[in-house]
Image: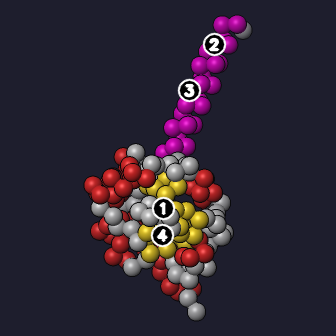
Amino acid sequence: MNRLLPLLGFFALVGLLGFGIWWNTHHETNEVPSPLIGKSAPEFVLPLLYDPAKTLSKKELLGKPYLVNVFGSWCVTCQYEHPILTEKVKPLGIKLIGMAWKDQPEDAKRWLAQFGDPYDAVVSDVDGRTGIDFGVYMAPESFLVDAQGTIRYKRIGMFTPELIESELLPEMAKLQQARP
């Protein structure tokens, strides 16, 4: 019996490994459903990146839908997403709010000067607390918020043109249909 124990352990390990491989190929592992979908966006008041004496709050954004895009100068993926925001999201006409998350203002300004600034407003979340309230755990992440301040869609990771077409545009269309 003592000789069978290592063999049984080996087969158990192979079984677990096989199950893990099967699970990863049959389930999307990059998407974590947000518990905030359908709930009110967190209240926030953050300084504007280019004029920190002024702030932007959730209350000021109510009345029209907007898209919050969380980025950081330290985020390599954000560099790849940035031209897509400029070329594909900005022309959609929705207010685009950039949130420089866990980033020093000077670094974020330098990054935007280098890659361009597609945002209608950029806020600075240096300590990351507002991002935590939104449930952010990486950058880039984006949140579609309706005119009443309810989160309707969350994208973890970068937008691609295909995702804009297959996910963001249908969600924006739903917002248009919901208007009285």
Residue at point 48% right, 45% down? 25
Q: Which residue is mark 4?
A: 67
Q: Nearer the viewer, residue 3 or 95?
A: 95
Measured as percent of width and height from the top left, residue 151 is found at 59, 69
Asked if the stretch drawn in magenta spans residue 145, the answer is no
Q: Which residue is mark 1?
A: 52
The correct choice, above or below, for 152 with respect to 63 in the image is above
Asked if the stretch drawn in magenta spans residue 18, the answer is yes
Measured as percent of width and height from the top left, residue 51 is found at 44, 64
Mark 3 or 4: in front is 4
Q: Which residues are magenta?
A: 2-25
Residue 146 as seen in the image, left or right of residue 84: right
| SS state under label 1 | loop
Q: Which residue is mark 2?
A: 6
Mark 2 / mark 1, whichever is N-terminal: 2
Question: Magenta segment, principal secondary structure?
Answer: helix
Q: Which of the 4 image quarters holds residue 179?
A: bottom right
Q: Which corner quadrant holds the C terminus?
A: bottom right
- Tell me how far mark 4 sits from mark 1, CA to CA: 21 Å
Q: Amino acid at mark 1?
A: Pro
- Tell me how far mark 2 sits from mark 1, CA to CA: 63 Å
- Tell me how far mark 4 sits from mark 2, CA to CA: 55 Å
The correct choice, above or below, for 53 with respect to 139 in the image is below
Mark sitting on residue 122: none
Is label 4 in contact with label 1 (beta carbons under 8 Å)? no
Circle 2 Cα neighbour tier, 10 Å, few/some/many (<14 / 14–19 / ≥20)? few
Q: Amino acid at mark 3?
A: Val
Q: Nearer the viewer, residue 29 or 158?
A: 158
Measured as percent of width and height from the top left, residue 111 is found at 33, 53
Q: Which corner quadrant holds the N terminus?
A: top right
